[in-house]
Image: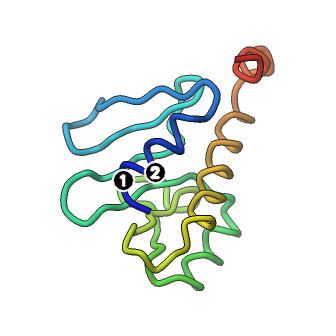
Amino acid sequence: MNIEELREYCISKKGVTEGFPFDEVTLVLKVGGKMFALANLDGEPSVNLKCDPELAVELRERYTSVTPGYHMNKQHWNTVMLDGTIPDPLIKAWIDLSYKLVLESLPKVRQREINQM
């Protein structure tokens, strides 16, 4: 999966916005105003994704291209190198999980608004 495919997949989800709040090389994707994916556009492509803490550790142990979240809470975030070693369906499943975790952390009223989009 390349950055363009990742971006297209993320913005196809309900309520997603994108922007560059930190710098011009970090694409931030949010749902309900909260980050669920941060894509590095400079150098080797990668994405930071929110993850269940136990699963985060398991994925780091299983895949060499998954590391603790760069500049993030390492208990809840992983950095995934988009180097072709992880199949696209698996990356999409991790994006889905990150999106779901963030969406579920929003107030119920906001969740309903997004789900009705």
Figure check: 47 above or below 107 = below
| Foreground of the two, 43 or 11 | 11
Q: Name the element at disc 2.
A: helix
Residue 47: percent from the left, percent from the top?
A: 42, 56
Q: Where does residue 14 sit, x and y in percent of width and height?
A: 64, 28
Q: List the residue tagged with mark 2.
A: 6
- Mark 1 to mark 2 CA distance (whole Å): 5 Å
Q: Quadrant of residue 48?
A: bottom left
Instruction: Report the number of numbered marks.
Output: 2
Q: Closest to the observer: 117 or 107? A: 117
Give the vertical position of 92 relative to 112 (above or below): below
Determine which of the numbered discs, if any, sits on residue 3 in the image. 1
The amino acid sitting under disc 2 is: Leu
Cβ–Cβ under 8 Å for marks 1 and 2? yes
Quadrant of residue 99 within the rendered picture: top right
Q: Residues within 10 Å of mark 1 (few under 14, many from 20)?
A: some
- Residue 13 drawn above or below residue 26: above
In-image side of 115 versus 22 (left or right):
right
Residue 64 disc label: none
85 horizontally vs 114: left or right: left
In the foreground, 42 or 9: 9
Instruction: Please indicate whether residue 44 sits to the left or right of residue 79 in the image.
Output: left
Using the rendered view, name the quadrant where residue 93 is placed: bottom right
Percent coordinates x, y for residue 69 in the rendering: 44, 61
Q: Residue at x 37, y 74 (%)?
A: 83
Q: Amino acid at mark 1?
A: Ile
Secondary structure at numbered mark 1: helix
Horizontal relation, residue 2 to residue 30: left or right: left
Q: Nearer the viewer, residue 45 or 73?
A: 45
